[in-house]
Image (cartoon, rainbow, N blue to C red):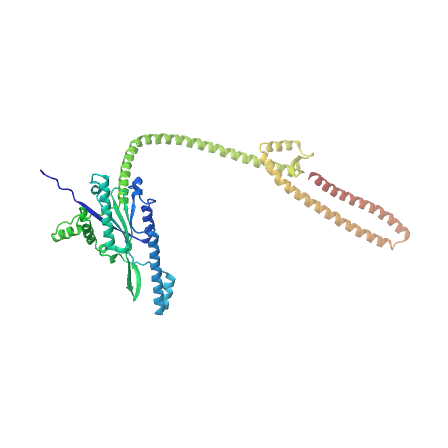
Amino acid sequence: MFHQPSPKFAVVCRYQGLFPADIAGYEKHRTRNGGDLGHVDPSRSHLNRPVIGEADWAARTIAMIEDMKAENFADEIETLTRRRRKKQLKERMVEGPRDPWRATRHGPMREVILTANRDWFDALPTPASREARAQAFEDAAKDWLLENFGEDVVHARADLDEQAFHIHAVIVPKVQVDLNGTKRWMLQPSKHDLIKNYEAAQDSVGHNFAPLGLVRGEQRAAAVRKARQNRDEPPAYRRHVRTVDWRKAQEASIAETRSDLDNRANALADDEAKLEHRQDAVTAREDAIALREGATADRERVAETKEQDADAVLAIAQGVAAGAFDIDDNAGAPVLVETPAANPRLLAKLRARMAPSSSGRGRALHVFSKALARLRKQARNEAKAIVARDTVEIQSADKKIVEIAARLPDADRRSIGKIRTSLTARIMALTGRAEDRENRSKDDKGERS
């Protein structure tokens, strides 16, 4: 009877470069608090378990790297001081501690992923046997990591909440090197042969997991060398795609398909939209015409109002100038008063011009009342000055009359005395009436205010 051979499953080993700054993101994803969790089954996350390292491995690792930086800096400062390199010492003091690794695109640390095809883990019939297979894979992974990387394996864990059981590990390749005669602590991935030589790592993993029935992955490098020797086309390079990148590519493909369907739906709706657009254009033109007509009417009304305001202001100005109007102060508010001597026909014309614009009348009263108040005040001040000046002149003339009369005979002196007494009484009466008018004007102002 023909027996179909059992399929061969390969053990998978991949490296991913890491910088110390990536540790925080790594921890978020490890604890399922961040990163791409679309491929994670939350109901199984509690099954994930540590394999190597303490729970606070991340904080310990960051602290260790900071200590390396500080120790290197202290040694460098000590060396420069001992060698009396003052300029270099000053520059390094300003620059401060440096990262303890050479410039690298991939990072000075490595994440290691060890796994196999999901079908290999699920091939056994019972949950207990499948769990035993996963545990055997975990034990083999732990042995391989410690044997090849030793204390540089600061962390390893087993993830059971994704499609296939797999191991994550973090390698911090700490090494002390001689740099310019001084010892320096560095992170140097090439210290490990299995990081420096990827094919050697695949050989080592294949050998380590062979007892579990797993085989080494495709020997692509050997196939490429053989093809080049035979001048054949080398096999296509199979680039590993991270789960997050694969999911992004799938989402982009789905989005592209949806976009194509949306474009087709939009194309079907275009004709209807064009018809609606044409109708909207006609309606918009009609609305624009109506708006222009309304705007024209509004401008005409505004122009008419401004013209009425201006004519009302001009009418009041002409009435005040002609003596037909006066402006009184009524409790602080200006009031337009028609004078008794005003021409009735002129008043009728002025009233008709003021009637259409109460706002123009108000502005005119506000402006003209202030102007008239200033003119009246100026006139009063001028009148007071004239009376005072005339009084002084009269008093001076009276003194001269007295001096002249003193030199005349008695009869003439008595006659001049009578005349002087009569003149003085009349002058004082005139002065009193002028003062009374001034006082009445002040009293009127006080009553109005």
Q: Is residue 314 visible?
A: no
Q: Residue at x 29, y 46 (%)?
A: 49
- The image quadrant that residue 175 belongs to is bottom left
- Left or right, residue 9 beside residue 292: left
| Left-right relation of 13 to 27 | left
Q: What is the quadrant of residue 147 in the picture?
A: bottom left
Q: Quadrant of the N terminus?
A: top left
Please tell me which residue lies in front, 324 or 179. 179
Res 132 seen here: yes
- Of residues 90 and 185, the one nearer the viewer is 185
Image coordinates of residue 231 in percent, x first then y, are 12, 52
Q: Position of residue 440 (x, y in %)?
A: 74, 41
Image coords of residue 55 (percent x, y)? 33, 50
- Image coordinates of residue 262 in percent, x first then y, are 29, 35
Looking at the picture, tell me which residue is in the foreground, 60 or 440: 60
Figure quadrant of the C terminus: top right
What residue appears at the point 84 percent right and 46 percent down from the top-left corner? 422
Q: Residue 263 occupies which quadrant of the picture?
A: top left
User: Is 215 placed left or right of 446 in the picture?
Assistant: left
Residue positioned 86% across, 53% down in the render: 405
Is 414 rendered above or below residue 364?
below
